[in-house]
Amino acid sequence: MTTEPPIIEFRNVTRSFGSQMILRNVSFKLERGQTVAVIGESGCGKSVTLKLMIGLIAPNSGDVLLDGRSHASRSERELTKERLRFGYVFQGAALFDSLTVGENIAFPLRQNTQMTDQQIHNEMQERLRDVGLPPLVAHKRPAELSGGMKKRVGLARALALQPEIMLYDEPTTGLDPIMTDVINTLIAQTREKRPMTSVVVTHEMSTVGRTADRVLMLYPLPRLEATDGQVVFDGSPAEAFSTENRRVYQFVHGMAGERLEELAVK
Amino acid sequence: MQTALQTDSPLSAPIRAVGKITIEGVTLAGDLAIFAGQMLAWLFTRLPRYSVILTSAYAIGVMSLPVVLLTGAFIGMVIAVQTFEQFQFMHLETQLGATINMSLVRELGPVLTATMLAGRVGSSIAAELGTMKITEQIDALRVLGANPIQYLVVPRFVACVLLIPLLALCADAAGVVGGWFFGSQILGVNSVHYWNHSEDFIGAFDLFTGAAKCAFFGAAIAIIACHRGFHCSAGAEGVGKAATEAFVLSFVAILVLDFLAGILLNEIYHLLYMPSVGVG
């Protein structure tokens, strides 16, 4: 009897940019159907983790495995095909400025399917409805949209190919509390509509509480000793909220702690 | 210890600076060659949709036409202003048309049009792609199953290679008309002489020379501008730097290519029209 491999696995992944190391020997496994929140301070490597998962960047050492097979063992063509299993909601939405909202949502369908123009149009309208936007928005340019609308269009575009893994990069950052609630609800609804694995990178604890069933916390390398692991917490949201681990507690409850003393010294 | 002393020595500073510039130059040249190779691989295997190419062609070709015509017309008039007195002194003012048109069609039209387009088109491409890079739009393309080089670089390359020669021919035409207007209507050179001499001294090969040079210039502008955009660093400063580098590197490439293409096309001219000179 063979056991199914985890859908995504990090094995001792290290990644640097120039002389700055962002991730050091990070290892974890994501099981199918889980919604995992990756939390941590700015600069701890949350977004880099997402880009490694989808193969946009490669680790300097270690392995990122998808369905038990390393990204490094795949050709660029294979990796491009595997990426279509992912939906990626970018931090700033990353909508194509030169295209209308409708063309943005239709882009992956036009690029990767043989659907007719009418089918693509219908699909695009349905994705707009999924994220609660009126059909008329399809004719607008991204520059004409508010931050919350951009995030919703980004979500609609990410859902166009009906992915099995959703990656959200700080989906609620910079939004007002009402829009944050709307996006959190959309993330939860997306998961309820069809089973999928989701990874939500965030530093908003309301998003963690509303969407996640597992929490991973990364810690910035400059604040760790050489022997410390970078994943400082791996557990349920309830455990994250109730833990007495100082690093996790400070982050979850928004307490600066020794950082204020550092400021005073400066 | 010895190495530390050597690198700390003030005398080693210029050597290190030269070494650094050399390494950066070679790295850039190699990186540009790889980038161009990837672009050519897509160009000959899978072109993007025609609508994508047409969008680039419109932005690069049609939108540049007014400024190219204006530049060409003024180049023609400036040559007329600069050369008229010398020719009049030698009683050769009727040759004005030949001088204007030869310098315009063979050299100044293509080079100045390409230089102007390196500024207008090259900087714009680098800034647009640079902004796409820092706002993660290039990553989004890869996530959505599109290859950024195929989708962003190939259409701009095709548009530049095909349309910059045509724009240069338009600039030539505007310059000829500009030269005629200033020479004949303002300075009083006889129009019949102007056009007759223009016709006598300009042949099909001259037009081909200008257009062929511009195809090389267009390729260089597209590759350099796209490359700089793809390697843009973060922030407004990064985008500004990418746009500036795109123009400066394109301008240098235009001058170098003009020199090399001039030698090559001269050889071709001798082979085609003066075989005995070419062989001898």
Image (tube, coloured by chain):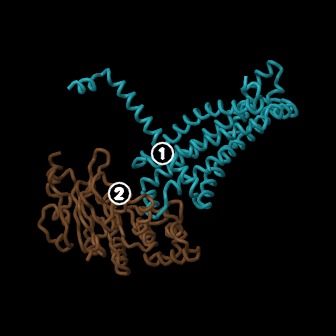
> What residue is pinned by disc 2?
A72
Q: Where A157 falls versus B67 (above or below)?
A: below
Image position of A53 (left or right of A28) = right
Say which of A126 and B44 sits in front. B44
For the residue marked with disc 2, what is the amino acid? Answer: Ala
- Quadrant in the picture for residue A63: bottom left
The percent position of residue B21, horizontal first and vertical second, equals 41, 32
> What residue is pinned by disc 1?
B34
Chain B on-screen colour? cyan
Which numbered marker is on residue B182?
A: none
Say which of B134 and A178 sits in front. B134
Say which chain tag 1 marks: B
Residue density around tag 1, few if under 14, some if 14–19, many if 20 or more, within 10 Å: few
The percent position of residue A71, horizontal first and vertical second, equals 35, 60
Say which of A85 and B155 sits in front. A85
Residue density around tag 2, few if under 14, some if 14–19, many if 20 or more, within 10 Å: some
Secondary structure state at the residue bearing disc 1: helix
Confirm whether residue B150 shows in the render: yes
For the residue marked with disc 1, what is the amino acid? Answer: Ile
Q: Where A203 falls versus A164 (above or below)?
A: above
Q: From the image, which quarter does the C terminus of chain A lie in?
A: top left
Say which chain tag 2 marks: A
Q: Where A266 falls versus A156 (above or below)?
A: above
Confirm whether residue A148 shows in the render: no
